[in-house]
């Protein structure tokens, strides 16, 4: 006897429209690009600040 899985009721057979899928991927790419730029500038900023705080390194 199989136990009832309540999560199976949450799954649908619907398909995502292609334009919505493209928009979702473009948003994910935009977030990834913004995170890369922020990490590039903020990472260097923290590196410069740590060197200025401890110049004997």
Image (tube, rainbow, N blue to C red):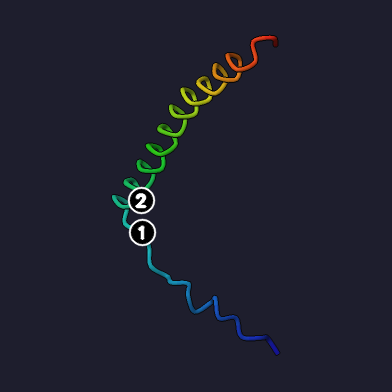
Q: Which residue lies furthest to the left in this view?
A: 19
Residue 41 drawn at (x, y percent): 46, 22
Q: Image quadrant for the C terminus?
A: top right
Q: Residues within 10 Å of mark 2 (few under 14, many from 20)?
A: few
Q: Do the residues labelled 2 and 1 touch (CB within 8 Å)?
A: yes
Determine which quarter of the picture holds residue 46: top right
In 3D space, how far apart are the residues under numbered discs 2 and 1 (Cα atoms)? 7 Å
Q: Image quadrant for the N terminus?
A: bottom right
Nearer-the-camera pick, 1 or 4: 4
**Would residue 32 be found to the left or right of residue 54 on screen?**
left
Residue at x-position 69% and y-position 9%: 56
Label 1 secondary element: loop
Determine which quarter of the picture holds residue 25: top left
Residue 53 drawn at (x, y percent): 60, 17
Q: Earlier in the sequence, mark 2 or mark 1?
A: 1
Determine which quarter of the picture holds residue 52: top right
Residue 21 image label: 2
Residue 16 image label: 1
Residue 44 image label: none
Residue at x-position 42% and y-position 32%: 33
Label 2 secondary element: helix
- The answer to whether 41 is drawn above or below residue 15 in the figure is above
Q: Which residue lies furthest to the front in this view?
A: 53
Nearer-the-camera pick, 18 or 10: 10
- The answer to whether 40 is drawn above or below residue 3 in the figure is above
Residue at x-position 64% and y-position 10%: 55
Q: Residues within 10 Å of mark 1 (few under 14, many from 20)?
A: few
- The answer to whether 37 is drawn above or below residue 24 in the figure is above
**Would residue 5 be found to the left or right of residue 45 on screen?**
right
């Amino acid at each position: 006897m199989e136990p009832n899985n309540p999560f199976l009721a949450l799954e649908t057979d619907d398909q995502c429209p292609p334009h919505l899928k493209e928009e979702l991927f473009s948003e994910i790419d935009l977030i990834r690009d913004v995170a890369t730029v922020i990490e590039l500038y903020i990472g260097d900023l923290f590196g410069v600040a740590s060197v200025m705080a401890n110049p004997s390194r």
